[in-house]
Image (tube, rainbow, N blue to C red):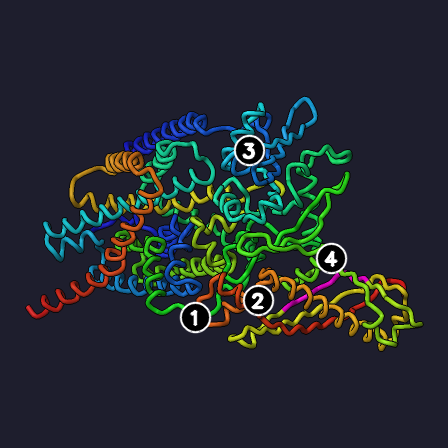
């Protein structure tokens, strides 16, 4: 018995020795990993691509450098090379810190480049493990470099500024969402095309100025910012959107027209929407598009008596009519440029067996596609003051 | 074969052992391989592969029950005699060795591709191997415990599948059964590499205390694995579009690539690191299975065996360097595993049955 006890003691001792060895090894091996100390790296927060003048691409990187003593500094560096990695090297040649892209939030593309095609850039971004798939993408009207290089009076960190601009607009559902993942997904989907917000410089400000429509990764057309509501309502759903429109006098029912007053502007918020697409005819693609919206009236001018059921119903009707008209216009426009940003093709592919759909085939079908739009608009309530 | 009771473990732990041995590196990127053949019906392929594991396990248990308390190596020696039986044993040991190597090398590749492109294979291999040696020298019961914790501690990862659902589109799954049945079966065949691991039952069976419960827990663990695989596949199919899924190398990891929290910018980095916990049972159990086979062939102590084993694996990681080599190895292993893991146990059962009949007649 005593002997056995002794043996166990020895085992414990052995174990302890082992443990120490392991700890020592881990400590020793820890040094092998490459370390990135915050003070010694430059964080690229935004990157913009343009068509290069001499070489293939021109990139503009917004790099934030953290200094322990001073305020952090933001550098905007434009370089030209044949690959984005080559450009990174070019950037590194100009800064004192190691440039990393793990904190990148936004990728911008110049208009000319987008018209040439973004396939390469999307692939390169998806391929790089250091690029988060949640980064936002956007198109810059004209060129990226001048927009980033300009010394804005009130904008300290241009990278962060553009990121916040996109983020808040996308999260509040004022703008269509364009995360790298979504863009890549739409690019590689058979029956869907990409869409991205467009930003432009307006004197001392940067603003969202529309939506870019793509066909096969090439930008083919744009839509003005108010149309982003219509695009979004067909593309996906709203949880809390805002919509504002002006009803022309011919759209207005007589009950709402006090005088022969010409127009009526209305604004809604807290919009919840649900869309359903159904394919009714597969041969010559025909879809039923039903959009159900529920909203709250926020502003009406000129005001009318909202306590009357009849007049509220009349307003609902008028809005439905207006929405149908606008949606038809937006769809017709996208059909003309053969850019299916709504995903009608996905609906077609998923409901027609053995369609063997290709992007090319769908684009030719899409052109002559018919859509029957039904809008169901319900006013839930108005504000706290009638 | 007599196993001392203190080396045995409860039958319910078999659930964790088999589940832990199954889920490993394959699930990180099996989507594109299955999608190639089965397209949007890939999840049906996964389901079929899961059903196949149930059938094979049923026959495995039947065979093992006939012998009462013997493992695959013992059965080989009993059926084919010492010499031919040992040839089979060598093949199985080699299979375990290659499977171990493949798991290790694939995981190292993931770390290098995602987080540390500059760290050498030798470094990652030696760190991981040291952990395995540490667990191995402590004995089977510790390895079973490792499997238990590996499964329990990684359960939360399943919940993370909720995040990508934000971008999910059910349309991507439609139309169901558009792909012809042959292609779906081909997809199920491609699942081999991802779904193997449950063959550990053939070796570990004598160590289970309550043999009557084996069947219940074995099938439960297979069910759990299949459920997780189908869930991952369905979410991936809904999240990615067709062209994208085919190009994404580790689709399961990329699923998490857009998730970021205020305190951690890149969530998938956590997942990649955490995955080490998931592959440790894989490695431990394959090493142990190889050890059980080796002691039938030569007289070697467990410590000596694992150091030698680790050394050979380590040398292997120095040879296999490129993605091309790794993929080639995976395909070859997968092809071999289909015969060794899926077809052979059924064949073995037939042989054992026939042999029994012949013996009865005599």
What is the C-alpha distance between the residues marked 4 and 1? 38 Å
- Please give the label number shown on residue B184: none
Earlier residue among tags 2 and 4: 4
What is the C-alpha distance between the residues marked 3 and 1? 46 Å
- Please give the label number shown on residue A80: 3
Disc 2 and disc 3 on one polypeptide chain? yes
Q: Is residue A266 above or below residue A251?
A: above
Q: Quadrant of residue A37?
A: top right
Earlier residue among tags 2 and 3: 3
- Tell whether label 3 touches label 4 (CB within 8 Å): no
Q: Which residue is mark 2?
A: A367
Q: Is residue A94 above or below residue B255?
A: above
Q: Which residue is mark 1?
A: A354
Q: Is residue A137 above or below residue B188?
A: above
Residues in magenta, as a range: A267-275
Which chain is disc 3 placed on? A
Which chain is disc 2 placed on? A
Q: Nearer the viewer, residue A358 or A124?
A: A358
Label 3, residues with CA under 10 Å away: few <14, some 14-19, many ≥20: many
Earlier residue among tags 4 and 1: 4
Observer-side mark, 2 or 1, equals 2
Q: Name the element at disc 1.
A: loop
Residue B325: x percent and y percent? 31, 42
Q: Which residue is mark 4?
A: A226
- Tell whether label 4 touches label 2 (CB within 8 Å): no
């Amino acid at each position: 018995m005593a002997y056995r006890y002794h043996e166990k003691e020895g085992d414990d001792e052995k174990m302890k020795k082992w443990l120490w060895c392991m700890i020592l090894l881990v400590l020793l091996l820890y040094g092998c990993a490459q370390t990135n100390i915050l003070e010694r790296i430059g964080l690229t927060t935004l990157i913009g691509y343009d068509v290069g003048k001499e070489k293939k691409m021109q990139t503009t990187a917004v790099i934030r450098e953290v200094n322990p003593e001073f305020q952090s500094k933001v550098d905007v560096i434009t370089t030209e090379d044949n690959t984005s990695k080559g450009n990174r090297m070019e950037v590194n040649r100009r800064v004192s810190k190691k440039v990393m892209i793990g904190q990148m939030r936004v990728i911008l593309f110049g208009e000319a480049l987008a018209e040439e095609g973004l396939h390469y850039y999307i692939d390169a971004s998806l391929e790089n493990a250091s690029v988060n798939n949640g980064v936002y993408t956007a198109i810059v009207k004209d060129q990226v470099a001048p927009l980033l290089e300009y010394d804005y009076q009130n904008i300290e960190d241009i990278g962060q500024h553009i990121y916040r601009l996109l983020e808040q607009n996308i999260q509040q559902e004022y703008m269509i969402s364009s995360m790298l993942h979504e863009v890549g997904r739409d690019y590689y989907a058979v029956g869907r095309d990409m869409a991205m917000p467009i930003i432009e410089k307006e004197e001392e400000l940067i603003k969202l100025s529309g939506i870019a429509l793509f066909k096969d990764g090439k930008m083919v057309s744009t839509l003005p910012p108010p149309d982003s509501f219509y695009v979004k309502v067909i593309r996906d759903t709203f949880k809390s959107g805002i919509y504002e429109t002006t009803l022309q006098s011919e759209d207005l029912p007589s009950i709402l027209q006090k005088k022969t007053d010409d127009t009526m502007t209305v604004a809604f918020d807290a919009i919840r929407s649900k869309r359903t697409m159904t394919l009714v005819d597969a041969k010559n693609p025909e879809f039923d598009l039903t959009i159900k919206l529920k909203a709250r009236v926020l502003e009406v001018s000129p005001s009318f008596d909202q306590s009357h059921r009849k007049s509220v119903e009349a307003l609902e009707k008028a809005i439905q009519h207006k929405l149908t008209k606008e949606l038809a216009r937006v769809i017709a426009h996208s059909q003309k440029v053969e850019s299916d940003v709504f995903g009608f093709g996905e609906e077609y592919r998923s409901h027609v067996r053995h369609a063997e759909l290709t992007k090319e085939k769908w684009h030719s079908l899409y052109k002559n596609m018919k859509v029957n739009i039904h809008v169901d608009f319900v006013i839930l309530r108005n504000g706290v003051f009638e | 074969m007599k196993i001392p009771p203190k080396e045995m473990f409860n039958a319910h732990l078999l659930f964790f052992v088999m589940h832990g041995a199954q889920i490993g590196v394959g699930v990180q990127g099996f989507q594109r391989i299955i999608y190639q053949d089965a397209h949007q019906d890939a999840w049906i392929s996964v389901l079929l592969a899961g059903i196949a594991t149930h059938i094979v396990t049923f026959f495995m248990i039947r065979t093992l029950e006939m012998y009462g308390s013997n493992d695959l190596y013992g059965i080989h020696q009993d059926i084919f005699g010492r010499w031919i039986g040992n040839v089979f044993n060598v093949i199985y040991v080699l299979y375990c060795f290659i499977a171990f190597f493949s798991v290790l090398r694939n995981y190292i590749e993931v770390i290098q591709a995602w987080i540390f492109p500059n760290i050498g294979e030798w470094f990652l291999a030696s760190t991981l191997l040291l952990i395995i040696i540490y667990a191995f020298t402590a004995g089977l019961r510790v390895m079973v415990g490792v499997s238990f914790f590996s499964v329990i501690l990684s359960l939360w990862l399943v919940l993370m599948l909720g995040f990508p659902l934000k971008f999910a589109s059910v349309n991507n799954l439609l139309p169901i059964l558009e792909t012809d049945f042959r292609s779906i079966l081909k997809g199920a065949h491609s699942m081999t590499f991802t779904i193997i691991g449950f063959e550990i039952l053939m070796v570990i069976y004598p160590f289970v205390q309550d043999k009557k419960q084996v069947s219940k827990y074995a099938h439960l663990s297979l069910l759990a694995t299949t459920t997780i695989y189908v869930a991952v596949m369905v979410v991936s199919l809904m999240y990615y579009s067709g062209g994208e899924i085919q190009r994404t190398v580790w689709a399961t990891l990329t699923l998490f690539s857009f998730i970021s929290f205020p305190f951690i910018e890149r969530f998938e980095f956590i997942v990649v690191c955490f995955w080490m916990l998931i592959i440790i049972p894989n490695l431990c159990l394959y090493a142990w299975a190889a050890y059980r086979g080796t002691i039938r062939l030569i007289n070697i102590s467990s410590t000596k065996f694992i150091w030698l084993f680790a050394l050979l694996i380590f040398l292997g990681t120095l040879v296999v360097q490129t993605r091309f080599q790794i993929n080639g190895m995976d395909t070859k292993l997968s092809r071999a595993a289909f015969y060794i893991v899926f077809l052979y146990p059924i064949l073995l059962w037939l042989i054992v049955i026939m042999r029994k009949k012949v013996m009865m007649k005599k």
